[in-house]
Image (spheres, rainbow, N blue to C red):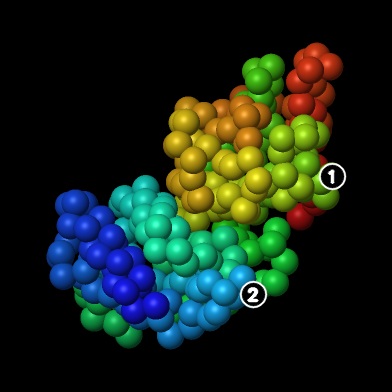
Amino acid sequence: MTGKLDQIEAKLKAFFEKSARLAPQQQQLHIAEQLVVAMRNAIEDDAEGGLAAPGAYLLRMHPQTLAEWEQNPPLLAELTSTLQDAAKEAGIRFQTPLIIRLTEDHALAPNTVKIALAKQTSKLEETAALSLEKSGSANSDTVRQINAFLILKDRRAIPLNQPVINLGRMLDNQIAIEDPRVSRKHAQLRIMQNHYMLIDLNSTGGTYVNGQRIHQATLKPGDVISLAGVPLIYGEDSHQNTSIDRTGVMPASSPDEPTFTGKEKSA
């Protein structure tokens, strides 16, 4: 096990060494070391004879350090993806979909980061829906400021007006996609640091952004999403697009098109 974790730590350090977006460098390397220590302290043997690590990690940092991270939203998604890939190469799986989140801690010195395991719920669809800390609060004001939407293949759009939105084939998803390629609980959209994050929920067909398979990615306007081949486009607008159907029901444009259903929920 030690060799596999050392392999993961080396991958994380290599990732940070290539990234010049945060300083100081020692802080970044310390994060790599702490992530591996957190994994080492909680890793377990799984039923198939392999190793399984916790899937949720919390990075506590001084507000100044947190502000530096928030200026580079893609960095957290890239760190998560790097850890996911490194664990897969080392033959270690995560017990739940991997997610790393940030929170501020005024008791810490500037440029200091502490890492701990984060609590998660037991249901898969709620796995990525972790309770947000102050740094990533997901209130209705934040949702209105982002004013985001998904554009479907027929060029119609569905508004994203909730902090947590599940996508999948089951009708109890906020956005239900009736297509056999899509998993019952396929992916989740979640507000984090005032951006929508797309998280794959261990789907069978995979979740892709701009042609790249992802586990977690911060979305930008114009990003092309694919849920196992079902296309969506993520958009943001400072003024609500009048073409968006506020009922949330997106009928297919032809019998061959998947059906999308978005359910509005009262506050």
Outermost residue to the front: 49
Q: Quadrant of residue 157?
A: top right
Of the numbered discs 2 and 1, the one sitting upstream in the chain is 2
Is disc 1 placed on a helix, strand or loop? loop
Q: Is residue 215 left or right of residue 40?
A: right
Residue lying at 34% horizontally and 79% vertically, measured from the top left: 2
Residue 17 against residue 221 in the figure, above or below: below
Q: Is residue 220 left or right of residue 225?
A: left
Q: Can the viewer see residue 145 in this picture?
A: no
Q: Nearer the viewer, mark 2 or mark 1?
A: 2
Q: Amino acid at mark 2?
A: Ala
Quarter that holds the N terminus:
bottom left
Residue under numbered circle 1: 171
Quarter that holds the C terminus:
bottom right
Marks 2 and 1, how far apart at CA: 32 Å
Q: Quadrant of residue 155?
A: top right
Percent position (x, y) of residue 153?
66, 20
Query: Which disc is residue 47 wearing?
Result: 2
Residue lying at 70% horizontally and 72% vertically, measured from the top left: 122
Q: Residues within 10 Å of mark 2 (few under 14, many from 20)?
A: few
Residue 90 against residue 141 in the figure, above or below: below
Residue 53 against residue 223 in the figure, above or below: below
Pick the front one: 180 or 98: 180
Q: Amino acid at mark 1?
A: Leu
Percent position (x, y) of residue 142?
54, 51
Give yes or no for contact between labels 2 and 1 (Cβ–Cβ under 8 Å).
Answer: no
Residue lying at 56% horizontally and 28% vertically, measured from the top left: 233
